[in-house]
């Protein structure tokens, strides 16, 4: 299984790697067997699978449900469970409790949380829960940011770079850099020992993450940060239409698909 030590070693060796989101068992199995080393059960399950407008309504129960399914499908990949909005911001105790649930009840090997919650990161690392940090464009703060806007431009670059440094000191084993200028992400990557995982943060990060629905072309719209590597929406539509045509024409089920 991929470990936090592998990631550090890959960074030191200059080996780039990938992380993908996964929300269910068959997808986790496919990604795991393809060799993706990190599977993130992102709270993006909210807008990609559950039909919410954003990630804010996602609950701990929903995260546990999807984390369990992904953990069942992953044999080699490290499974990272995302802490949803308001499951860790109210108190450190609640954050520890909920992170522990993702590991204990969900089968996650590590957790991810958004923003510079340094004391919580420290505490989790202390009790043995590896933490992936996430800074820059943090979707759980969509309203505070005034929309999904690039972060860390101009003067704000110092604040973002400082957060990255503090999170490394607090013990995070890696850090997602989302929606920030490529130059800033490159500087942060060069200044840290832990790997950076970019999305909308340019090519200099140690790793790249994509939302699986964007990569496969499942959603109607792919955001600027995503890239469509396939058109599964088209493939699914063609298959469903072919099924309807065969049933309407009376050619399915044929002899091969019937019992005598
Ligand atoms: O929830 C998620 O999918 C994420 C990734 C985009 C990093 O946080």
Image (spheres, rainbow, N blue to C red):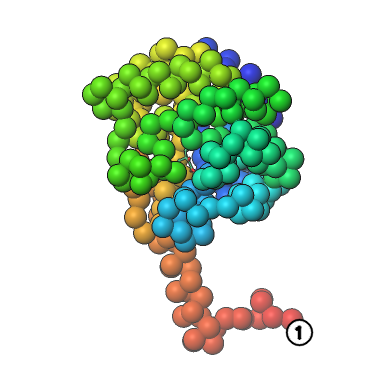
Q: Nearer the viewer, residue 201 or 217?
A: 201
Q: Residue at x 44, y 43 (%)?
A: 140
Q: How many marks?
A: 1
Residue 129 lies, with reference to residue 255, above or below; the image says above
- Could you tell me which secondary element the residue under label 1 belongs to? loop
**Is the CB–ligand 1 distance for label 1 below 8 Å?**
no
Q: Is 224 located above or below residue 166 in the figure?
A: below
x and y, in percent, of residue 246 in the image: 51, 80
Residue 82 is situated, as x and y percent measured from the top left of the image, at: 56, 41
Query: In this view of the protein, can residue 240 be seen by the observer?
Result: yes
Q: Position of residue 151 (x, y in %)?
A: 31, 32
Instruction: Give the residue at the far front of this rendering.
Output: 91
Q: Is residue 70 left or right of residue 147?
A: right
From the image, which quarter does the N terminus lie in? top right
- In the rendered image, residue 160, in percent from the top left (x then y), is placed at 37, 24
Q: Residue at x 64, y 25 (%)?
A: 123
- 130 left or right of 251? right
At a point 53% along the width and 24% down the height, the residue shown is 118
Which residue is pictured at 53% across the width and 53% down the height? 58
Q: Nearer the viewer, residue 118 or 43?
A: 118
The part of the image, by quadrant, that contains residue 10 is: top right
Residue that numbered label 1 is attached to:
260
Judge from the rendering whether residue 61 lies leftward or rightward of residue 239; answer left or right: right
Task: State which quarter of the image contains the C terminus.
Answer: bottom right
Quick one: label 1, few (<14), some, or many (20+) residues within 10 Å?
few
The answer to whether residue 14 of the structure is visible from this angle is: no
């Amino acid at each position: 299984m991929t470990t936090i030590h592998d990631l550090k070693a890959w960074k030191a060796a200059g080996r780039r790697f990938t992380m993908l989101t996964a929300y269910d068992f068959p997808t986790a199995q496919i990604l795991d067997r393809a060799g993706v080393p990190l599977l993130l059960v992102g709270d993006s399950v909210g807008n990609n699978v559950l039909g919410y407008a954003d990630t804010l309504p996602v609950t701990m129960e929903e995260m546990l449900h999807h984390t369990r399914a992904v953990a069942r499908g992953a044999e080699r990949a490290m499974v990272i469970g995302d802490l949803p909005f308001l499951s860790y911001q109210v108190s450190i105790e609640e954050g520890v409790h909920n992170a522990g649930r993702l590991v204990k009840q969900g089968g996650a090997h590590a957790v991810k949380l958004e923003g510079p919650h340094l004391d919580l990161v420290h505490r989790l690392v202390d009790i043995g829960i590896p933490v992936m940090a996430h800074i820059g464009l943090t979707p759980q703060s969509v309203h505070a940011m005034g929309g999904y806007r690039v972060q860390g431009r101009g003067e704000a670059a110092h604040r973002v770079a400082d957060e990255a440094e503090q999170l490394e000191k607090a013990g995070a084993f890696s850090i997602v850099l989302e929606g920030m200028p490529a130059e800033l992400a490159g500087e942060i990557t060069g200044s840290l020992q832990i790997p950076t995982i970019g999305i909308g943060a340019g090519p200099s990060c140690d790793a790249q993450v994509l939302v699986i629905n964007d990569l496969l072309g499942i959603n109607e719209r792919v955001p600027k940060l995503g890239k469509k590597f396939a058109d599964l929406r088209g493939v699914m539509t063609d298959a469903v239409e072919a099924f309807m045509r065969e049933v309407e024409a009376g050619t399915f089920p044929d002899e091969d698909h019937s019992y005598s």
